[in-house]
Image (cartoon, rainbow, N blue to C red):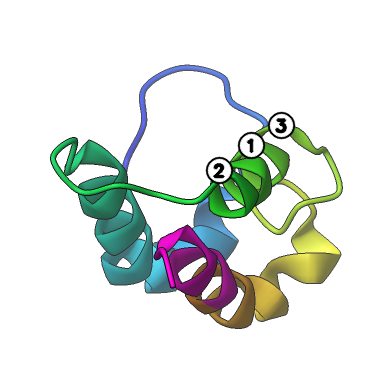
């Protein structure tokens, strides 16, 4: 996963999780499928919080667990 330009993303730490990140992107792009408010709040925090594993190199090991949690939380009961 290569992004052009300067970015605060932990690119090296996220590279092994490209499939999981793509699954999240695909789920969010499925506009015909409803999502929960809680799930969207978790997505927002993942993307905007500087302490999220997307940015914090010390938290990168947690990305698989967090992405699975977010994907699960997006699904309506």
The magenta stretch spans which residues? 69-77
State if disc 2 and disc 1 touch (CB < 8 Å): yes
**Which of marks 3 and 2 precedes in the sequence?**
2
| Label 1: element kind | helix
User: Considering depth in this image, is 5 or 43 the residue closer to the camera?
Assistant: 43
State if disc 3 and disc 2 touch (CB < 8 Å): no
Residue 29 position (above or below residue 71): above
User: Considering depth in this image, is 4 or 53 the residue closer to the camera?
Assistant: 53
Residue 21 position (above or below residue 26): below
User: Residue 43: x and y, percent?
Assistant: 58, 46
Q: Is residue 21 visible?
A: yes
Say whether residue 38 is magenta.
no
Quick one: label 1, few (<14), some, or many (20+) residues within 10 Å? few
Q: Count how many numbered circles sit on residues in the image.
A: 3
Q: CA distance from mark 1 to mark 2?
A: 6 Å
Q: Is residue 1 visible?
A: no
Q: What residue is disc 2 on?
A: 40
User: Residue 64: x and y, percent?
Assistant: 54, 79
Q: CA distance from mark 2 to mark 3?
A: 12 Å
User: Residue 46: x and y, percent?
Assistant: 66, 47
Q: What residue is disc 3 on?
A: 48
Q: What residue is disc 1 on?
A: 44
State if disc 1 and disc 3 touch (CB < 8 Å): yes
């Amino acid at each position: 996963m290569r992004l052009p330009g300067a970015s605060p993303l932990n690119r090296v730490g996220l590279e092994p999780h490209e499939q999981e990140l793509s699954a999240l992107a695909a789920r969010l792009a499925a506009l015909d499928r409803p999502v929960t408010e809680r799930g969207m709040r978790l997505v927002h925090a993942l993307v905007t919080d500087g302490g999220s594993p997307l940015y914090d190199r010390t938290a990168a090991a947690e990305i698989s667990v967090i992405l699975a949690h977010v994907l699960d939380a997006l699904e309506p009961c």
